């Protein structure tokens, strides 16, 4: 069974693919993630920030906002979904 690149929980029926370096910044590689994890990433970081951090989920998890999300989602079922807060302008 595959695991989510961001939270390391087992993947469910719905899988999305995240570009650690956004396509708009030249990224080609993708990583499997839960839809809720994918939305949390893009709600927390700009494409410029994602390009700078790259393929390092541990570095992403050091962000306090994303760390709170990861702690909250850790014991949820693989197919769990909830609305994601939007990025603050």
Image (spheres, rainbow, N blue to C red):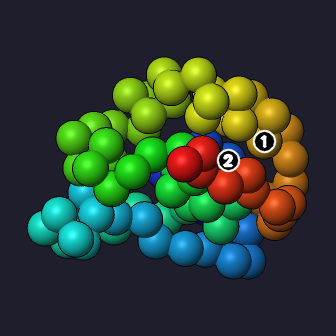
Of the 4 image quadrants, the one containing the N terminus is: bottom right
- Apparent side of residue 19 relative to residue 41 in the rendered image (left or right): left
Q: Which residue is mark 2?
A: 9
Q: Earlier in the sequence, mark 2 or mark 1?
A: 2
Label 1, secondary structure: give it.
helix
Q: Position of residue 82 (x, y in %)?
A: 85, 60
Residue occupying the far front of the picture: 89
- 21 or 11, which is in the foreground? 21
- Apparent side of residue 27 relative to residue 49 in the rendered image (left or right): left
Q: Position of residue 52 (x, y in %)?
A: 22, 41
Residue positioned 60% across, 34% down in the render: 66
Residue positioned 71% across, 28% down in the render: 68
Residue positioned 39% across, 51% down in the render: 46
Q: Position of residue 39 (x, y in %)?
A: 61, 60
Q: Position of residue 77 (x, y in %)?
A: 86, 54
Q: Which residue is mark 1?
A: 73
- Apparent side of residue 53 relative to residue 67 in the rendered image (left or right): left
What separation in Å lies between label 2 and label 1 (alpha carbons)? 9 Å
Label 2, secondary structure: give it.
loop
């Amino acid at each position: 069974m595959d695991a989510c690149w961001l939270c390391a929980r087992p993947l469910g029926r719905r899988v999305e693919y995240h570009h650690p370096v956004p396509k708009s910044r030249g990224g080609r590689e993708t990583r499997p993630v839960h839809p809720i994890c994918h939305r949390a990433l893009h709600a927390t970081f700009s494409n410029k920030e994602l390009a700078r951090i790259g393929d390092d989920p541990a570095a992403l998890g050091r962000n306090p906002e994303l760390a709170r999300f990861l702690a909250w989602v850790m014991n949820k079922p693989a197919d769990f979904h909830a609305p994601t807060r939007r990025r603050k302008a």
